Amino acid sequence: MDKKKAVVISLGAFCLPVVVMLGIYWARGIYPFGPSYILTIDMNNQYVTFFSYLREILKGEHSFFYTFSKTLGGDMTGLSAYYLLSPLNVVLCFFSTEMLPVGIEILTLLKLGLCGLTMNLFLSRKKSSWMTVLFSVSYALMSYGIVYQQNLMWLDGVLLLPLVLWGIHKIMEGKPFLLYVFALTGSILTNYYIGFMICIFSAIYFCYLLLAGERQEKVGKTLGKFAGGSVLAAGLSSFLLLPVFFSLQGGKAGFSLDVLSLQKSFHWSDFFLKLFIGSFDYREIQTGLPNVFCGMGVLFLACLFFLVKGISLQKKLAAALVMVVLYLSFYIDGFNLIWHGLNYPAWFPYRYSFVFCAFLILLAREAAGVLQKEHGKRLLLITGVLLALFSGLAYWALHQNATFLTKEKLLLSAGIFAGSGLLWLVYREKKSQKAAGILLALLCLGELFLNGRYCLEEFHYQGTETYAQEVKDPQAAVDLVKEQDYGFYRMEKTFSRGQNDPMLFGYRGLSHYSSTEKDFVKYFMGQTGFRNNGNWSYYNRGSTYAMDALLGVKYVLTRDTLGQGYEKMQEYQGISVYENQYALPIGFLADSGVTKTGIDEEKKLKLQNQIWKALSPETEEELFEPEGAFGIKTVNVIPSEENGETHYRKTDPQKPGYIQYIFTAQNTDPVFAYIPCSQMKKVTAAVNGRYLGAYFDVYQYDIMRLGSFEKGEQVTLTFSLQEEEVFMGEPEFYSQNMDIMQQYYDSLKGGFLRDIQGEDTKITGTVENDGTRDTMLFTIPSDSSWHVCIDGEETGTETAFDTFLTVKVPKGTHKIELRYQPAGWKGGILTSACSLGILGFCLVHCHRKKRK
């Protein structure tokens, strides 16, 4: 009977968070109850694309280690380890790209349910009780789980934390450390970032249990088990951790001790504003306070923990010390930074706040367990004092001008706090337990529902129809190209859903957004005319036709018309597929000067001339030619010179303002433009009345394709100010000489890598070198993890244009092979293998000891 009851209780701990969360989705209008998918902020911009790519990996079409679907190509180890290694992600394999948001919602509900289940297993380790379900649901649906649920990869650590803590208790009880090792290893492997935070809290919690007098063995033996288990978990994870460490070098996810400081993160009292229901608004996502709400009942009992007689003073002092440590972690900037791996989080602050909630819930559970032993009158007095103090706190909060708190939320919080406190007093009496328990459950679930509804109302979610429109036709067009050409090539689009479309739709492209992207790759993209805002770079509407050729963009999907050098192959639902007649292969022979040519030239079109000249110096003429003199005309705008650029300001802010650049086309070749600026002030652009879109915009500030014109035709590029002012440097207007483009292509054609067989981590081909050139350039970012063999013998590599991988190739016909092996992989495998051997020994030892 006890086993059946335990199973039913466990099912309740899993199902109740799911049911309440579905209720919150219903209230918010999220699928299947409304017109929105559970896609918002980074889940919409990044994670849905990574999950789409994961489906391709699990099908065997791509690799966990390297991909050509991020910018020029790049390692996947860091990205996979951070976003994709949850075993629960296998659920997503059953959903197409178009229906992927449904799979993500199911996965979210599954993880939240498991958070409740694992916490219940931990809290019920000695005795199952329906009351533990309330604490478990409070853990699953704490504000962290609601607000940060879009960061789906963090929830694995949240659901594994209770098992880690349970493992620490087993160590304290003199039992084997196996549960601790397995749970901590799982936390690290599913997301090393959250796993690192769990490692820190594990040490804090272990010290808490030691100070609270929970150990049943000698200190040295207990400490040895904990330390040994921690090291073993790190060792078992080394096959991943070492490659990840090398993968993160050169990206924005770096590490630095120089940023540590004792500066305060917020006013000391602001923390208490986050204890109320619905204490969140959208601004909190960027630079807010810790999300520590986990229920009024939990807060009431956690306060009682320090006031009841049934808990020893030693344990209370130890718990108080932990609370102080966690508070100071939030409060002191340097301590907070340590929790985040010495790297400032971009949005979503205090990503470890779930450990505070977990500890608060553990204190509440322990306090609930001793209530029946307390004297009724004393407990009633304590409850009265707590209600008065909380009412005072709510009154104070009302006058703090916190944007995320309203009078309604504060009254609800005070009422539920009072109701929870009184019901817990009634619950002490056996004859009233059932009725009080039901009311407590309703109150707990109700407040968690309200908190979730308040929080999710702050987010804007992607509409179901909008997502379908953005995904359905582009995916079909991409699939059409891939079905007709199985070769190794790049493809791009002049329209986009986001910066990770190559991963979303499964093609080799030039766009990417993640914290693992290398800075030098983004720099190259920005210097050569693509959009680079520092966090991401992407193809957008493309740079010049010459860059498409250099980077091997063989197919371009567009809703526009492309000019010379592109042949229209087919059309699907308004999306035209063009084939680039000048697309170079992934590898080709170039002049040795490419390794000596940098990319620091400020004028982007002039830089492209330098790049092509370095590739083939014998081609004497310039590929890009300036369009000559231009005139400037303004309407409702006054220009002034400031710091080497022109500052245009509207004369009348209420009227439209225009700036027009006017020049005469020198030939029929395609014309490109770039205008530098020091401050981004949004404008819209049009050429001869044809709308080109926004410019000086976070998403669109790159080389513009103006089109082809008749010789002698007047070209007018018009910028319409969307703000009161705009700053513009000296504009660049160049045409790409297509005859010279043909000459460059012909001069390089003889050294193309041919018979290419390509995968993400292995590329093979043959090249015939007539001795004219000795350097093979691969348009792949230079990386020591690429190993290049010529006729079976590995050779050293160099870097071209501060970006690309190159090797020296002797005269003659040769077979070229590139293999990618993540740095640190061998050392990590060896360390994990040794750790696995030690773990095996421990398992055998425990088994023998148990038999004895």
Image: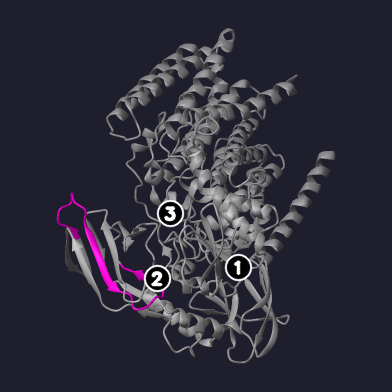
Q: In which quarter of the image is residue 479?
A: bottom right
User: Regarding mark 1 in the picture, which secondary structure is present there?
Assistant: loop
Instruction: Establish if 620 lies above or below 375.
Output: below
Check if residue 23 falls in the magenta segment: no
Q: Say which residue label 2 marks.
A: 708
In the rendered image, the quadrant that contains the C terminus is top right
Circle 2 crowding by C-alpha within 10 Å: few under 14, some 14–19, many from 20: some
Residue drawn where x is 52% and y is 15% of the image = 439
Circle 1 crowding by C-alpha within 10 Å: few under 14, some 14–19, many from 20: many
Sequence-earlier tag: 3 or 1: 3
In the rendered image, the quadrant that contains the N terminus is top right
Sequence-earlier tag: 2 or 1: 1
Q: Say which residue label 1 marks.
A: 489
Q: Residue 396, position in %: x, y? A: 30, 28
850 or 421: nearer the eye? 421
Residue drawn where x is 66% and y is 85% of the image = 768
**Amino acid on which disc 3 is placed:** Tyr
Q: Residue 621, position in %: x, y? A: 42, 87
**Amino acid on which disc 1 is placed:** Tyr
Segment colored magenta: 649-676
Camera-side mark, 3 or 1: 1
Sequence-earlier tag: 2 or 3: 3
**Amino acid on which disc 2 is placed:** Ser
User: Regarding mark 3 in the picture, which secondary structure is present there?
Assistant: loop
